[in-house]
Image: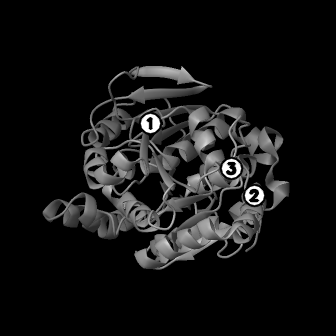
Amino acid sequence: MPRPDARADAGAAGPAGGRLAGRRVVFLSWRDTRNPEGGGAERYLEKMAAGLVARGCRVTIFCVAYAGAAPVETVDGVRFVRRGTKVSVYALGMWSLLRRRFGRVDLVVDVQNGLPFFSPLVTRRPVVVLVHHVHREQWPVVYPGLTGRVGWWIERRVAPRLYRRCQYVTVSRATRAELRALGVDGPRIAVVHNGTDPVVSVAARKSAHPSICVVGRLVPHKQVEHAIDAARSLSEEFPDLRLRVVGSGWWEAELHEYARDLVERGTVVFEGHVSEVRKQEVYEESWVMALPSIKEGWGLVVGEAAAHRTPTVAYAGAGGTQESIVDGVSGILVHSQAELTAALGGLLRERAARERLADGALQHSAGYTWGHSQAAFAHVVASALRGELVSDQDATGE
């Protein structure tokens, strides 16, 4: 797989830096990383926001309010404005733009997490649409019935027409292909990959007993049940097996009930929402990570685990996993639940195979840096401000 061009790691001193100084950019997003439901998508948008701040932009992230969060605060130079619920936040974002509540705005980044913010209806400023993945498979799982069908109709039919003149950014070529299938045509989809954070040094080491981790939000489309089923099957061969589930979400109670027998035996351990240090410890302790999600734009946790030499087993059909994982080199891509269980069992069983994938995972993840991603995203923003569209190749330097 082609790697990002390391020369793009120009940082704030790059050409886009001078062009962006003083520009005001507003991100409209459902969530931020401090939200209990925040995840890799929110990590990405805040990294991109920080990259713009480093280049002299004044950046605001507008997102939903939640318990314990300040309505307005500035963190690392990024201003956060939190209003409404996960339903009303869209209308409030449009209203705030229309009424100029953000002051002068030079560009809007409309984060389409299933639903867009419909920003072209209320602003004439350039709009960049950030899409991590298409939600075709998730709508019927999260919102069965009419609500899901309406949501998918908006994403599939309405959004491509509304944003037909806008620049798109996505994190993987798989999502780019899906967007093109929805009618987002022409050279206006820039692929800006996720980066990988520098490894956090922790005192933990690989556990003495077989250990699998799952890291992410506990929601139905993450399919954590598949990892639990795998642990149930493999525990007959590996009686001291541990499956550690890190994260929280509204599906958590159902998962606890589903795994009750394994929790009582100590095979499955729900860690909950943990500190960053504890998350890194779990990565370090685990022999392998399972990522049984229906769909991933990229799979930020893949790189995080890889930095600790922990390879990932994931579904090939999840989209972005086909790029964040090199099958057979940095992890294993499977096509069914039975294959997921078999691959996990094989890696627990075969240390040599595990070590080979661990080396590959570390090497592959090192090729993706946040510095490159921020430089590429800044280039897209600077181009949009000039009224120019950017293709995948233009953005990544490949």
Q: Secondary structure at mark 2?
A: helix
Quarter in which the C terminus is drawn: bottom right
Q: With 53 as the anchor, is 45 left or right in this view? A: left
Foreground residue among 133 and 108 = 133
What's under tag 2, amino acid-wise? Answer: Leu
CB atoms at circles 1 and 3 under 8 Å apart?
Answer: no
What's under tag 3, amino acid-wise? Answer: Thr
Reading the image, the residue beneath label 1 is 273
Q: Is residue 140 visible?
A: yes
Mark 1 and mark 3: Cα distance apart in space = 21 Å
User: Could you tell me which residue is drawn at 43 percent across and 45 percent down?
Assistant: 269
Reading the image, the residue beneath label 2 is 362
Q: With 275 as the anchor, is 29 left or right in this view? A: left
Mark 2 and mark 1: Cα distance apart in space = 25 Å
Q: Secondary structure at mark 1?
A: loop
Residue 390: % across, % down: 64, 63
User: Could you tell me which residue is drawn at 72 percent across and 72 percent down?
Assistant: 329
Reading the image, the residue beneath label 3 is 196
